[in-house]
Image (spheres, rainbow, N blue to C red):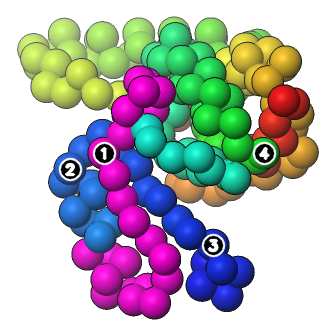
Amino acid sequence: MYENLGIEVVGADVSEDMISKSREKVDKEIQSADVSFQHGDILERSTINIDPDIVVCIRLLNWFSFNEVRESISNIDELDAKYAIVGIRTQSDEEIGFKKRLWLLQAQIIFRLLNLKKVNNNSINIHSENEFNQLLQGKFNIEQRVLVDIGTSPKNFGSEYYIYLLKSIN
């Protein structure tokens, strides 16, 4: 698709391992496309050295706290791309509090009963749909929002994963 459209693709990631895996995949599957990679951190705008027409950020924001999501959206906005495609798992404010508290209570009971130690601090964060939409105001118009089925887990608290097509207001 990129080759047919004459699009230059620049991938940026903070992980050299992910950059290496992406290069391998491109070399194996898309030999003729104009694709390059660089080290870059969405949380530190100064590390991303591109002037894009469109920014794509999928399956990343839920690894971040909401403050980091705020920083990421601000940095995406500062890249001055006309469009952004962003994926994020959100939940309505009415559901997010109750379901999350219930799940955390169940997890605490299980950990205490089994005398388990917490092994992994990395977990998916479910963000408030209203807060995320407010964060976009003044920076982007939501052109389209599509619900994507990426599987379910009890840790998802009944939330939904959406892909947003955003148009810069600038």
Q: Residue at x 35, y 46 (%)?
A: 13
User: Is 167 one of the magenta-colored residues?
Assistant: no
The residue beneath circle 2 is 16
Q: CA distance from mark 1 to mark 4?
A: 22 Å
Give the CA separation, mark 2 to mark 3.
24 Å
The residue depicted at 19 percent of the width and 27 percent of the height is 120
Looking at the picture, which amino acid does disc 3 mark? Answer: Ile
Q: Is residue 31 depicted above or below 56 in this figure?
A: below
Which numbered mark, 1 or 2, is in the foreground of this view?
1
Q: Kindly identify the residue that appears in the image at 19 percent across and 10 percent down.
A: 112
- Residue highlighted by disc 4: 82
Q: Quadrant of residue 75?
A: top right
Q: Which mark is residue 84?
A: none
Q: Up-down: is 50 above or below 9?
A: above
Q: Residue 97 is drawn in which quadrant? A: top right
* Foreground label between 2 and 3: 3
Identify residue type, mark 1: His
Can you say which quadrant of the picture contains the N terminus?
bottom right
Find numbered disc 3 in the image and state the secondary structure of the residue it sits on. loop
Q: Which residue is tagged 3?
A: 7
Compute the Cα span from label 4 to label 2.
Answer: 28 Å
The one of 67 and 129 positioned closer to us in this rendering: 67
Q: Magenta part of the protein: which range? A: 24-47
Residue 99 is at least partly visible in this image: no
**What residue is rendered at 25% in x and 44% in y?**
15
